[in-house]
Amino acid sequence: MPRILIGVVLALGAAITAFPFFWMISTSLKPASESLQYPPTPFPQTVTFEYYVQLFTQLDFGRYTINTVIIVLFGFIGMILMAMAGYAFGKFQFRGREPLFVLVLATMMIPVQVTMIPTYLILNGMKLTNTLIGIALPTLVGGFGIFLFRQFMSTIPTEMLEAARLDGASEIRIFFQVVLPMSKPILAVQTILTFIAGWNSFLWPLIIAGEQKNYTLSVGLSLLNQQIAINPPLQMAAASLMVIPILIIFVIFQRYIVQGFTLSGLK
Amino acid sequence: MALTTSAIPPRMKKRRSVTSAGATPYLFLSPAMLLLCAFGLLPILVAAFVSFTDLNIKGLANWSNVQFIGIDNYTTLFTDAAFWSAMGNTAIFVVFGVPVIIGVSLAVALMLNYSQTRFFRFLRAFYFIPAITAIVAVALIWGYLYNTQFGLLNYLLSLVNIPPLQWLSDPTLAKFSVALVAVWRATGLNIIIFLAALQGIPRDYLEAAELDGANSWKRITRIILPLMRFAIFFVTVTTVISWLQFFDEPFVLTEGGPLGATTSISLFLFLEGFRLNQFGYASAGSLVLFVIIIVATLVQLKLRKADDEY
C-alpha cells in the first residue's frame, strides 16, 4: 500500500478519534438554544463563556476542582512511599524480601470490584467515609508503581550509596538527596501517570465522597448528567474542565506518557 | 554535599550489589506495605468473610444485626436472573469486544509504524488522547452525540437517509453503543503497546525479507505478527480482564438499562452493593467475578504454553 494512502486512512481515523473532543469544546461555547438546534452547527455561531462561569458561580465546581487537586497531591505522597518501597526492594538485602515482593506483585491481580465493598467497610470502620483522605487512601500505593521503582532503582550504583554513608549521611537523607535525584526519568513517568490517575479517578470518589463538599470533578460531572438533562453546553463545559488540563499535560509531556504506558505494557 | 564516585577509595567498593543495613529497609518499606495490606490484601479476606453473612445497611450501623448465613448468598446468586443477565452481557462484551479492540489497535499500529515521518508521529498523538481522558467526561460527550433528539449521530444518518436510531434506549443497540465508547477508548493504550513491540523487531529481518521479494502482506503475516506474539498475548489478557471489569461507560451512559441490557457484572455488583446496600450478597458476587478473572487468565496462559510447544 502506498504511503500516501496509509497517511490518508490514518488521518481520517485520527480525525474520527479526536472528534468527540472537538464536539465537546465547540458545544461548550454555544448558547443552550444553539446546542439543541437541528441540524447541529459544527462551530458555535455565537461564542459564549457563560456556562464555564455558571459552573463556578451557580454550581460548586470551584470546590470540586480544589478537591480534585487535593486528591492529586495525596497521590504524590503515595508516589514517594512507592519510591521508598521500590528503593528498599532494589538496593537492600533483608529477610523476607522475596515473599514480600511476590505479595506486592500479587496485589496487581486483584480487581477493584472485589475490594470495593470491603474497602468501604474498612474505611467506614476507620470513620473515613465522607472524607477526602478516605477517597485518596485506598489508591495511594499500587503494586505496579512499586515494581517500576524497584526496576529502575536497582540500577543505581551501590558505590554512590556507600560513598554517601561514608560521608555520614543518614539513610533518609541518602534517599532524598542521592536516590531521588538519580531517579528523575522514572519519577517523571510516575508523576504524570499519578496526576492522570488522580485527576480522572471515578469509582472510589463516587463510593466514598458522600456529601457534596467532598465531590471531585468526576463525581460532580457524573451527577450533572442526571440532574440537568437538557443543558448540553453546561455539561460539555464541565467535561472540558476535566479534559482540557489533561490534554495540555499530554501535549507537553507526551514523551513521558507514552514511555509510561510502554513500561506498563511490557513489564 | 557533593557526592561523586571519584571520592570512593577503590578498596571501599563492595562486591555485593545490595547492602544489608539492619532495620533501614523495613523502615522504607513499611508505609507502602501497610497501605498495600490494608487496601489490597485485607479486603479479600473481608470480602470472603462478608460473603457468608447477610450484611446490609442495618448491619453497617450495628454489627449485632449481622447473621452468618453460610453459602446462602452464593445459592441465591446462581438463581438470580439479573446476575445471569449481567453475566450474559459481560460474555457478549468479551466475545465481541476483545477481537475488535485487538484487530483495530493492531491495524492502526501497523499503519502508524509504516513510516517515521513527522506527520505520522503527529497523527499518533490523536489516537492516544482517549486513553488518558476521564471516562466520565468521555461518556457524557458520547451521551450527547447519541442523543435521539438533537444528537449529531442521528443527524449524520439523516444525511444518508437513514431514520434516527435509538442509540441508548433500544436494548440491542444500547449494548453496541456502550461498547463502542469502550472500544474507542481502549484502542489508544493498546496501540502504544503494539507500537513498542513493532519497534523492537530487528530491521534486518524485514530488509532480508524484502530482498527475498516478500510483499508487505507477506512481511506482516510471516515475520511481524509471529514476532509480536507476546505483545498480542499480553494485550489479549489485559483486554479480557478489562472487559470483565467493564463499568464506567454503562454506568454513566445507561445506568445498565434499558431493562438491564447493558448491565455488566461490575455494574451489577455496584448496584447490589451500593444502591441496594446488600453488602454480603454483592461480596459473594465479587468473589465469583474474581474466580472468573483468575480462571480466564490461567486458561489464556495455558493456551499460550500449548502454542509455544508447537
Image (tube, coloured by chain):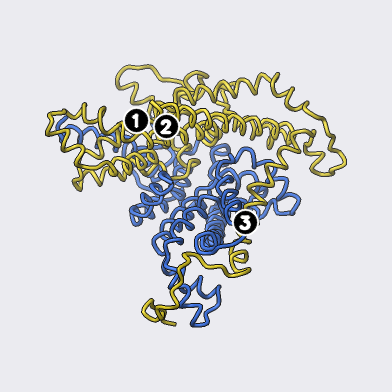
Chain colours: A blue, B yellow
Q: Is residue B159 above or below residue A234?
A: above
Give the spatial CA distance, label 3 vs label 1: 44 Å
Q: Give the letter of the chain under mark 2.
A: B
Give the labeled residue for mark 3. A96
Q: Secondary structure at mark 3?
A: loop
Side of A100 relative to B80 (left or right): left
Q: Quadrant of residue B61?
A: top right
Mark in front: 3 vs 1: 3
- The label on residue A187 is none
Whether residue A206 is visible here, answered yes or no, is yes
Give the spatial CA distance, label 2 vs label 3: 42 Å
Q: Give the letter of the chain under mark 3.
A: A
Give the labeled residue for mark 1. B104
Q: Position of residue A65 (x, y in %)?
A: 52, 55
Q: Position of residue B167 (x, y in %)?
A: 46, 24
Image quadrant holding the C terminus of chain B, namely top left
Give the spatial CA distance, label 2 vs label 1: 9 Å
Q: Secondary structure at mark 1?
A: helix
Q: Position of residue A188 (x, y in %)?
A: 41, 60
Whether residue A30 is visible here, answered yes or no, is no
Identify the residue at image location x=24%, y=37%: A11
Q: Position of residue A8 (x, y in %)?
A: 20, 34
Q: Secondary structure at mark 2?
A: helix
- The label on residue B183 is 2
Whether callout 2 and callout 3 share a subunit is answered no
Side of B50 relative to B159 (left or right): right
Identify the residue at image location x=62%, y=60%: A95
Q: Is the residue marked by circle 1 packed among few (<14), some (14-19), or many (20+) residues within 10 Å?
A: some
Image quadrant holding the N terminus of chain B, namely bottom left
Identify the residue at image location x=64%, y=50%: A212
